[in-house]
Image: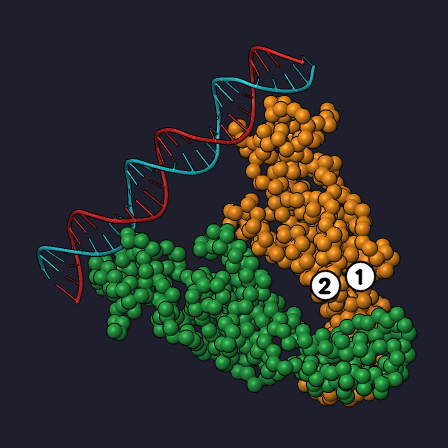
Chain colours: A orange, B green, C cyan, D red
Amino acid sequence: MSISERKKKILAAVVDEYIQTAEPVGSKAIAAKAGLGCSSATIRNELAELVNMGYLEQPHTSAGRVPTPMGYRMYVNELMEKQKLSLEETEEINRRLNRRLQELDDTISDVSRLASQLTNYPALALTTQAAVTIKRFDIIYVDANTFIIVVMLSNNSVKNKLVHLPVSVDQPMMQRLSSLFNSGFTGITEDQITPLLINSTERAADDTMGLTSVIAAFAISVLSESKVPASFISGENRLLSQPEFRDPDKAHKLMGYLSGGGYILPPGVSMSGPNEVKVLIGPENVAEELKDSSVIIASYDAGDNTRGIIGVVGPTRMDYSAVAEKLSLLAAGLSQRLGGGEGPPEGIHNKLIIKGDISNEQR
Amino acid sequence: MSISERKKKILAAVVDEYIQTAEPVGSKAIAAKAGLGCSSATIRNELAELVNMGYLEQPHTSAGRVPTPMGYRMYVNELMEKQKLSLEETEEINRRLNRRLQELDDTISDVSRLASQLTNYPALALTTQAAVTIKRFDIIYVDANTFIIVVMLSNNSVKNKLVHLPVSVDQPMMQRLSSLFNSGFTGITEDQITPLLINSTERAADDTMGLTSVIAAFAISVLSESKVPASFISGENRLLSQPEFRDPDKAHKLMGYLSGGGYILPPGVSMSGPNEVKVLIGPENVAEELKDSSVIIASYDAGDNTRGIIGVVGPTRMDYSAVAEKLSLLAAGLSQRLGGGEGPPEGIHNKLIIKGDISNEQR
DNA sequence: TGTTGGCACTCTTGCCTTTCGAGTGCTAAT
DNA sequence: ATTAGCACTCGAAAGGCAAGAGTGCCAACA
């Protein structure tokens, strides 16, 4: 059975209204608001059918209607009108993006903070990384007992470590190690750093003090750290301003899950393209803790096969349209700045593509 | 008028009990618990006097007693018995401390996370820095359009930046710049980097492409960033498990203040020595938002005049003894690992020194 | 057949009253 | 100085009542 045009309008009105007020919305309110020229009684009939069809529900017999996850899904997929961001908001996003572009890890925390401030929901940013290799290896001699290891990774981030030694090392030795590592340890992934490789390097450098293994250990740790997705969450406290989280227990549970670095993206579901926004509504989330929250995710291209993700978490009654638009803009901006340079031209005005529910089962 | 021995015992019992239960404690409960052989009626008399003296108050006439800030102060200064941490807890702290010791900024987030987990309160860590200078300056040539700036600071942290250029630069130029910066920009503070200095360096390097100013800008930004205290907070959500923050508005206000990087340490009050724990009870805090919370602070020596601070925030009814002990241990461990090496020997068993209220006005 | 006004019905919310009990303060006895 | 006893106070929980919002349904109507 297909859904009539008027039903769609009514459904949209219900969702819109509910998103704003957080209170069950009644037939009268809709009659007054939505510009369709019919009376509350008519609306009531329609509403009853929408309930039957599963798009709406009522908390109790004599209350207004509230959208079901399925209702939200319909709203997100077909009904909601794209929110036009004001020029100021667009400006603001770009301005802030331009400000800081340090190493990636730093950016990630900034990104999540920014997303959170912009949307007024808790936001979390993370990067998923393809295999990373070392592009360059340098060892800087500071003094006889101190040196700095600097590695540049294939994703263009640079890591360093200061090493203090209990013994003295001379500069030629450092030089030797530096060039050996630069030739032997670049372009390979973590699991290609074998004991064999380390041993041969050690011998070649004539290193009897175990320096080689210290340096190799750093290489390994850098590579393995880059492999686990870095994640950063901020603005958890904004949850508390949402009426649905006035119950401290509920809020606590969700916040605990989030600060625990809880995973947002359902496993096995990858973001297919950049500039695509994905919406996960209530029970569509896999994590038990998110079953009655919604998640909006955008992904961006951080260069060198690195994919970044920005996500925002809120109650199912969240402002999908505005948030999706903002995230999309943010992601596009990041892609442009971090990505391989093949991004869109200066003025960011991407199209907003919203990807629907993956599994079409609605339980 | 001095306070009798028995009154002290009773006061201690009230505080202890209230810390556990979060409910006003009555005369009967005390008579049962505290081992002093007298009946509830006697206790009532004493309680009435303690109220008069300002150590206790009652929410309403027919309720039990609750400690006032002044009562807590007395408790913290004289009454509370040092909590013995179990061996496991001590182990746990040390084990975790040993795990990660990367660059300072990284540690700071770990430290706050650790403190929060340990105490089950929101915790925040920050470093206050004396003037930082650059100790070493290196420029690594990657290719004609790319180089890496590496600076080592006087506090032994190392910062780097990858620079992409629109124009080509040859290696000798980089070399030249590297050694010029290494001699001219080391050992000086941010405000000693004058346009004059930059200009003369530029001329000496024969740099016509503005490289010098890019590099100098990085030096300035690193130095100025090191100057503002880095701070990191975690575990805000733990507030919600405290009954006094069941009111979402209250919780939201405080959490907002905290995540805003709100300052904890009253201005002008410096931690005098390491291994010293400071307790600020309710109205003793300067920030309006903290007026009915308590803050426990410990400071540690992070080497090179850098002082780190760990703080924990909770309701006035917080477990002062346990938290103070844990923070003290944590701070001592950090001092030992980060500090100038003149710390205490391996086994950490520091004395717990609790510093009292600074201004002795109790309003 | 779709739409509308009207009306009875339902269920929540807020408010008031009552009851219950924990805890106090006071007094008189030890 | 301590204690037992007792009347008193006050908040928290439980019940009851009225108001209001919103529905469902029916009968009338275009």
Q: Is residue C23 left or right of residue A286?
A: left
Residue A168 coordinates in the image, percent (x, y): 72, 88
Instruction: State the quadrant of the N terminus of chain A.
Output: top right
Q: Is residue B348 left or right of residue B156?
A: left
Q: Nearer the viewer, residue B102 or A11?
A: A11
Q: The disc numbered 2 marks a residue on which chain? A: A
Question: What is the secondary structure assignment of the residue under circle 1?
Answer: helix
Instruction: State the quadrant of the C terminus of chain A.
Output: top right
Residue at 87% in and 81% down:
B207
Which residue matches tag 1?
A: A338
Residue at 58% in and 40% down:
A21
Residue A95 sits above or below residue B142 on the image: above
- Residue B340: which quarter of the image? bottom right
Q: Is residue B103 left or right of residue B292?
A: right
Which residue matches tag 2?
A: A107
The answer to whether any part of residue B136 appears in the image is no
* Three-letter amino acid code of the residue under disc 2: Thr
